[in-house]
Amino acid sequence: MPTDPKPQPSFSPGRRWKIGFDVAVRTALVLAVVVMVLSSGTLAEAVDAGTVVGGNGETGVMGHSPVDMVLIPLFKAFLTVINLVKVFSPVDALSSGRSISWTELGTAFGQIVLLLGGIIGGIGILLFNRRELATAQGNQ
């Protein structure tokens, strides 16, 4: 009578480290997005000044950096997306007793659910494209 083979672990130690590192990196990315949304005022100030480096307080001359050519357009894009959500606030209208029009509701739905959901879905498609999310575990 043959002995039953010892069950194999579902993940090797290397794969466990890879998964743990992947989760840590994705968590850091989400926290970075939260910090970016919470610091949108600072981003707006940098876009208004046209630079991310400080200026001379005495002369009022703003400094410029080669990084500005990349970061300022990126900050503008981030602020555009962040302001889509911040502009629509039904709580103010409802708490003061006003109603929300169907046009305003449809616009908010289109901007928040369809546009931002599409952006998040597109990012998810790019991240998980060509990844094997689950493997078939056969009995052998």
Image: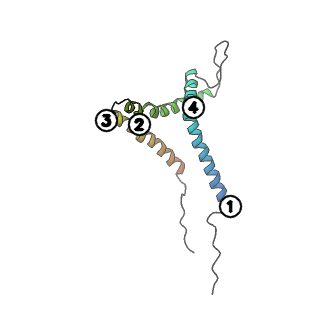
- Quick one: 30 or 66, which is closer to the camera? 30
Mark 3 or 1, nearer chain start? 1
Mark 4 or 1, nearer chain start? 1
Contact check, label 2 and label 3, Cβ < 8 Å? no
The three-letter amino acid code for the residue at tag 1 is Pro
The three-letter amino acid code for the residue at tag 4 is Ser
| Residue 94 image position (x, y, % from top left) | 37, 33
Residue at numbered disc 1: 13
**Discs 2/3, front:** 3
Q: Secondary structure at mark 3?
A: helix
Mark 2 or 3, nearer chain start? 3
Q: Which mark is residue 39?
A: 4
Residue at numbered disc 3: 102
At a point 64% along the width and 67% down the height, the residue shown is 9
| Residue 23 image position (x, y, % from top left) | 61, 51
At a point 41% along the width and 41% down the height, the residue shown is 113
> In the displayed structure, does residue 125 sit left or right of residue 100?
right
